[in-house]
Image: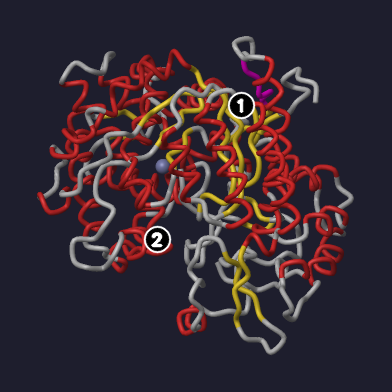
């Protein structure tokens, strides 16, 4: 997962707590107070109906007593990440929430971690609130890109620093572990307590190193330990991880946490696919130069039930698959781990995918919408992040550096289309069962599900580029009478190869201008598709889920 940019009119997110010795503003309070008077409850009810509630439970019967004791500690550490993400995305959570009287408004603010609708291009939904700053709360809102580029600050592009102004208005950096001194100390202590309960040596080591990392912002040792850990049933992804929230540069990582229970049976079934990566890399439909890196073979793929989401991953649309770590050095040494969040995926399939397909997929192709295909498409998306190349072929550095804030959307688009490529290739080899029609049709329905998140997110943009590319290449046809879509399997296969080549070439060339052009021209939702998506809303088909989660839901006592 990745991927998540604007002009700042209001100083909403520039708040006291974040500024280290610099000038500070408290506009947030005044802005929201004037705003609350015209907040309309009906609009917010409508917006809230885009989310459906799901109780986040899992079978804990296979866990030992100590493992059960670890979960509440990890959840508590997760709650700290939730607060840190609030600060990064917006600023002062309390001042915003306290200024609101309307229960629906409060609820919707909490789902979005701020007053901007993440499922609707980050449009402000509290009247009087300006557009969401591209800078979120990572950079001063009056800072231009030019000023940043000129600043002589060694760690300015670090994933783990805030940019602030000093008393003289000069840019300075503040490391996360300094900004969040008390919070990370508490979270670190909790991870250490959990480590004390861990019998599995790999997990004990990872939790201990992660506890250290929160205090120093040096995450690499814990990322390496996380990749070495194989036999743990309990897992936790915690810390500043993804950089989508920074839409100005895509440099700054946002805090989040997932508390996870590994599904040992499913994980075994998934294990065999990683072995095919080098072979599939060689077969990519692109000239040799663009596939010269060898994907890590130590990569692994596991299924989990997630029992707690906090921070970035809990904001707006909920992640159902993870590919980590993001550190390129760790990736080259150890590969990546892909985590498939099965219980969350099943919830989205049942509550969202099936109703969408009923409305938008041709009647005779509906039988091809299956959970197995949905699970596989999502899983192979994650595997496919490992394909392609991490470094440009023309000396522009890493693809991530060269493509800056546009990189996430393209990388997501790459993973989606190469995921389908992998399935197609493995199906030919007899390694993937079922009918290819299931995967392709479910993939098509998946595009509708994803573009409903809006074109603001990297995933949304990537999906629109693909939708428009597919349309131009005849991969589907829309019946004007019924408004339903019919997949052309042969043409979708051809379009898949062409789009793969286009994306891999843009990445290899580190072609920032080319990617910007593609996303601007093809990343928009056209009128016809918008009308079809509006049909889904009129039928009250939810766009995403909100979790009822925590120690009580799990039946665990603290
Ligand atoms: Zn992804």
Q: Which mark is residue 406?
A: 2
Reply above or below: 111 against 29. above
Residue drawn 20% across the image and 43% down it: 294
Describe residue 320's horizontal placement relative to residue 408 as left or right. right
Q: Quadrant of the C terminus?
A: top right
Q: Secondary structure at mark 1?
A: loop
Highlighted range, magenta: 54-58
Q: Residues within 10 Å of mark 1 (few under 14, many from 20)?
A: many
Residue 352 location, quadrant:
top right
Depth order, front residue of 479/169: 169
Reply above or below: 439 against 399. above
Residue 171 position in % (x across, y down): 60, 81
Residue mark closest to the camera, 2 vs 1: 1
The residue beneath circle 1 is 198
Depth order, front residue of 208/525: 208
Whether residue 484 is visible: no
């Amino acid at each position: 997962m990745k991927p998540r940019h604007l002009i700042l009119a209001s100083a909403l997110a520039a708040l006291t707590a974040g500024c280290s010795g610099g000038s500070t503003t408290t506009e947030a309070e005044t802005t929201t107070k004037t705003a609350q008077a015209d907040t309309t409850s009906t609009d917010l009810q409508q917006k809230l109906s885009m989310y459906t509630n799901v109780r986040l439970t899992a079978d804990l019967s296979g866990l030992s007593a100590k493992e059960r004791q670890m979960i509440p500690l990890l959840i508590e550490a997760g709650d700290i990440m939730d607060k840190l993400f609030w600060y990064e995305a917006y600023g002062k959570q309390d001042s915003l929430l306290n200024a609101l009287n309307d229960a629906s408004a409060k609820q919707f603010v909490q789902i979005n971690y701020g007053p901007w609708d993440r499922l609707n291009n980050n449009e402000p939904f509290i009247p009087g609130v300006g557009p969401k700053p591209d800078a979120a709360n990572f950079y001063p809102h009056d800072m231009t890109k030019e000023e940043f580029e000129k600043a002589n600050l060694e760690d300015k592009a670090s994933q783990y620093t805030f940019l602030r102004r000093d008393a003289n208005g000069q840019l300075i950096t503040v490391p996360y572990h300094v900004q969040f001194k008390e919070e990370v100390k508490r979270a670190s202590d909790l991870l250490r307590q959990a480590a004390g309960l861990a019998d599995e040596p790999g997990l004990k080591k990872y939790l201990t190193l992660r506890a250290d990392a929160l205090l120093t912002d040096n995450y690499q040792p814990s990322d390496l330990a996380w990749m070495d850990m194989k036999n743990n049933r309990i897992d936790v992804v915690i810390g500043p991880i993804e950089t989508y929230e920074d839409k100005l540069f895509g440099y700054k990582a946002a805090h989040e946490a997932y508390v996870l229970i590994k599904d040992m049976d499913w994980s075994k079934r998934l294990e065999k696919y990683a072995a095919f990566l080098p072979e599939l890399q060689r077969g990519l439909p692109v000239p040799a130069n663009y596939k010269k890196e060898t994907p890590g073979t130590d990569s692994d793929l596991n299924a989990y039930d997630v029992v707690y989401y906090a921070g970035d991953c809990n904001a707006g649309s909920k992640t159902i698959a993870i590919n980590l770590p993001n550190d390129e050095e760790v990736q080259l040494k150890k590969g990546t781990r892909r985590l498939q969040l099965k219980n969350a995926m099943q919830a989205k399939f049942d509550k969202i995918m099936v109703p969408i397909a009923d409305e938008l997929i041709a009647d005779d192709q509906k039988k091809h919408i299956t959970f197995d295909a949905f699970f596989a498409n999502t899983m192979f998306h994650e595997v496919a992040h490992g394909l392609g190349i991490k470094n440009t072929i023309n000396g522009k550095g890493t693809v991530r550096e060269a493509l800056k804030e546009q990189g996430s959307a393209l990388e997501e688009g790459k993973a989606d289309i190469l995921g389908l490529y992998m399935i197609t290739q493995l199906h030919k080899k007899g390694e993937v069962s079922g009918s290819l029609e299931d995967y392709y049709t479910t993939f098509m329905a998946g595009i509708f599900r994803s573009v409903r998140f809006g074109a603001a997110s990297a995933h949304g943009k990537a999906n629109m580029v693909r939708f428009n590319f597919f349309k131009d290449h005849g991969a589907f046809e829309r019946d004007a009478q019924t408004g339903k879509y019919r997949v052309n399997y042969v043409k979708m296969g051809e379009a898949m190869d062409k789009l793969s080549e286009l994306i891999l070439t843009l990445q290899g060339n580190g072609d920032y201008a080319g990617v910007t052009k593609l996303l601007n021209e093809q990343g928009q939702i056209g009128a016809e598709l918008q009308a079809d998506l509006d049909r889904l809303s009129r039928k009250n088909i939810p766009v995403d889920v909100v979790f009822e989660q925590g120690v009580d839901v799990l039946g665990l006592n603290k």
